[in-house]
Amino acid sequence: MIKELDTVVLARDVPEHGLVGGDVGSVVHVHRDGEAYEVEFVNAAGSTIAVLTLNSADVRPMADAEILHARRLAS
């Protein structure tokens, strides 16, 4: 189960915030026993890009065997 402060992977694009599936965020709040999550996405400087409420189908836990990847954020 995903819990607060876990690193999660976005499972779909959120174009209105410049996010794409595969982007990594941190859970800042869990709603209704995991039905939804408040997830913060930040840039490399640590500035918040977006804090979104996402359904459980919109994110997945990051696996230990995955590697992070950098990409330029669309303006």
Image (spheres, rainbow, N blue to C red):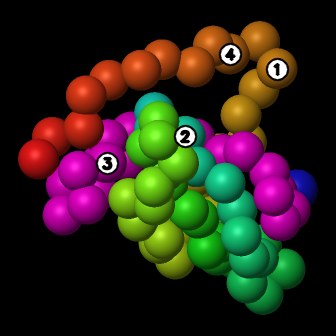
- The Cα atoms of the two marked residues, 2 and 4, are separated by 11 Å
Q: Which mark is residue 66?
A: 4
Q: Give the residue number, with chain letter if any, for mark 2.
A: 24
Mark-to-mark CA distance, 1 and 3: 22 Å
Callout 2 environment at 10 Å: few (<14), some (14 to 19), or many (20+)?
Answer: many
In the picture, measured across the screen, residue 48 lies left or right of residue 74, that is right
State which tag comes first along the sequence, 1 or 3. 3
Asked whether the beta carbons under mark 2 and mark 4 sit within 8 Å of each other, the answer is no
Structural crowding at the residue carrying mark 1, measured as other residues with C-alpha within 10 Å and reported as few (<14), some (14–19) or many (≥20): few
Q: In terms of sequence position, does the residue under pointer 3 or pointer 2 come before the other?
A: 3
Quick one: SS at disc 2? strand
Q: CA distance from mark 1 to mark 2?
A: 13 Å
Looking at the rendered structure, the number of numbered marks drawn on it comes to 4
Apparent side of residue 73 relative to residue 57 in the rendered image (left or right): left
Q: Residue at x 59, y 64 (%)?
A: 39
Looking at numbered disc 1 in the image, what kind of residue is underneath it?
Asp
Magenta region: which residues?
A: 2-21
Q: Are marks 4 and 1 in contact (CB under 8 Å)?
A: yes
Q: Is residue 58 visible?
A: no
The residue at which mark 3 appears reads as 19
What is the three-letter code of the residue carrying label 2? Answer: Val
- Say if the magenta span includes residue 4: yes
> Camera-side residue: 57 or 7?
7
Q: Quadrant of residue 66?
A: top right
Residue named by callout 1: 64
Name the N-terminal-most of marks 4 and 3.
3
Q: CA distance from mark 4 to mark 1?
A: 6 Å
**What's the distance in space between the residues labelled 3 and 2, CA to CA?**
9 Å
Circles 3 and 2, Cβ within 8 Å, touching? The answer is no
